[in-house]
Amino acid sequence: MVQVKEILTKALKKLVYDPLKIILKSRRGTFGLIIVLFFTLMATVGPLIVRYDPSTVNLSEALQPPSLKHPLGTDWFGRDILAMLIIGSQDVLFVSFVTALITTSVATFIGILSGYMGGKVDSALVAVTDIVLTIPGFPLLIVIASVLRTSNPILLAAILSITAWAPLSRAIRSQTLSLREREFVEMAKCLGMPSIHIIFSEILPNIMPYIIINGIFAFTGAIYAQVGLFMLGLAPYKSQNWGVMLNLAVNYAGAVFSIRQASLLAPAICIILLQVGLVFLSGSLEEVFNPRLRSG
Amino acid sequence: MRWIVKRIITLLTTFYIAITLTFFLIRLMPGNPIDVMINQYMQQGMSMEQARIMVSSLYQIDFSKPVWEQYIEYLQLIIRGNLGVSYIYTGVPVARIISYALPWTVFLLSISITLSFVLGIILGMFAAYRRNTKADHTITLFSTITNAIPNYVLALIFLFFFACVWKIFPMRGTRDPRIPPGFTLEFISNVFHHATLPILSFLITTVGSWILQMRGATISVLGEDYIKVAEARGLKGKRIMFSYVGRNAIIPLFTRLAIAIGYMFSGSVLIENIFTYTGIGYYLTYSVTARDYPLMQGCFLITTLAIILSNFIADLLYGFLDPRVRIER
């Protein structure tokens, strides 16, 4: 029992305490961590404690200024903006997270396969990656989303991943290529170890930090594409989403010329904060993984 | 010479795949627009035959032929530059709409990307020369933050404050229709007045990445031996800065220029929509919401073609700037 406890505390120290110490040391890292935690709480716990049902329309309360009852005011349909923001964060974060997961998995698989196997497999995969890199990502997304018209979050995430994996895959391939020539990999090969073993216990752990950091970038990219898609009104309207809020704010701004600032600025500021927070956090994580970057 | 031929083959393949992709998306996917449209006509009381004839005249498809023959015919039409006829703007050829929209997008993107690249290089070198000073920290922080902001969010904020609240810039459009187009000061200043907010949205959200990349590249070049040799030879600081440091630091940035142009074409879809700027991106979303598939297909293909061409030009430039590439390939 004592041993188990010892191992656990050691693991906890290595995986949680030490990285946390490095992150909290820098101002940017602390800021990023707080922002990301804040939005995670907003998306998971938030919807449980929201008092207003954001989907009900109450025209008698339309366009109210911020008050105690409605901290950010209401929109044209009398819906509470703060409540919409909180409910909307759920979809934004979930779909983006799944997209990042799919993107990085596909990129890692193709990148390692391509870099490790070499030869014809490699040239075929490189050709495919090059082509996907050239096809305009967001326009293709619009075309596909308009034909499929799905409101299923998993399917939406799959669509968002269609072209997003290519740049990361190319980068992982070149990482794998350089690792393949290193002594410890050559050694494992000489010892007759199976390729699967070499890939999973020699190559993958070495590029894991790289994958995690690029996973965060995939996450920010997914937020960009997803919110953009909803903002253009090209994905089904049923879901609550920051992009839908932006779309409504823009359309009503065009029609009425006087918009309540909160309905546009609140989702806009949330998106900016989340994106900046994620980038700061990824910068700090880079310091965690790469001791040479740490200052002081 | 050989690598140029190789590049051209890859680029042609990419374009061919993009064409094929749109064919399958529009004709063969479940819930594809052709089937939807036939169903619509049938609900309006047409027979299956009539509905098919209507749709086939609109899209220039012959349903009596097998799919692969339709595909060949479609390819032939595109090679001839015939992109079909718009469905919403009844009777107007898609090619004409594109020839009207494309100059606006190219205008917007070329100005934004040139300004962003040049400004990024200057500020990036400046930050690298003053590294670890307050100026450097400010520039780096500014770049990191603006780089993370989605361009359309910034565009919305600009639209709200500069066009709605303060009314400094126009809210929508590419130009004032009352002013006759021509080489007059009035017309040109009006065009730039309309383009300012879209260009600023692009510029501010992209300049950060150039600054950071140029800063990194400059710092690594400054550590090279040949810079120390140049300094030891007593060359002037300015000469070292421009023809030794600058020239070598810019080279890696050129490969990323092609990728950046691709991203900007994607971003222009969103920006053009926010400012109702009638370029390719605007017509792409417009055609999607209006279910005008010939127009959608045309806009998508022209965007792909533009990205392919800019990739090719960036590749050529790279080979021109870096002699090592020419020899290696």
Image: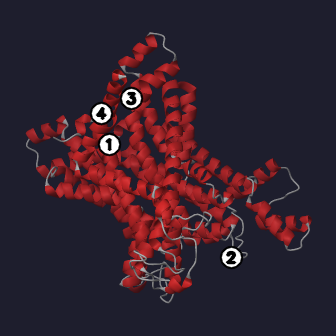
In front: label 2 or label 4: 4
Q: Position of residue B216 (x, y in %)?
A: 26, 46
Amino acid under label 1? Leu
x and y, in percent, of residue A24 in the image: 25, 47
Q: Quick one: label 3 or label 1, which is nearer the N terminus?
A: 3
Q: Distance between the Cα atoms at labels 2 and 3?
A: 56 Å
Residue B26: x %, y % from top left: 71, 57
How busy is the neighbourhood of tag 3: few (under 14 within 10 Å), some, or many (20 plus)?
some
Marks 2,3: beta carbons within 8 A: no
Q: Is B244 left, or right, of B266 in this rendering?
A: left
- The amino acid type found where label 2 is placed reads Tyr
Left or right of A61? Residue A280 is left
Badge number at residue A285: 1
Whole-number angstrom distance, CA of label 3 to CA of label 4: 20 Å
Is disc 1 surrounded by few (<14), some (14 to 19) or many (20+) residues within 10 Å? many
Label 2 in the same subunit as label 4: no
Q: Which residue type carries mark 4? A: Lys
Who's the residue at 49% across and 60% down the image? A48
Q: Quadrant of the C terminus of chain B?
A: top left
Report the residue that reaches farthest toward the bottom: B178
Q: Quadrant of residue B222?
A: top left
Look at 72% across and 65% down and name the residue there.
B84
| SS type, badge 1 | helix
**Residue identified by numbered label 4:** A13
Q: CA distance from mark 2 to mark 4?
A: 65 Å
**Residue B6 visible, this angle:** no
Secondary structure beneath dot 4 equals: helix
Q: Nearer the viewer, residue A35 or B105?
A: A35
Discs 4 and 1 share one subunit: yes
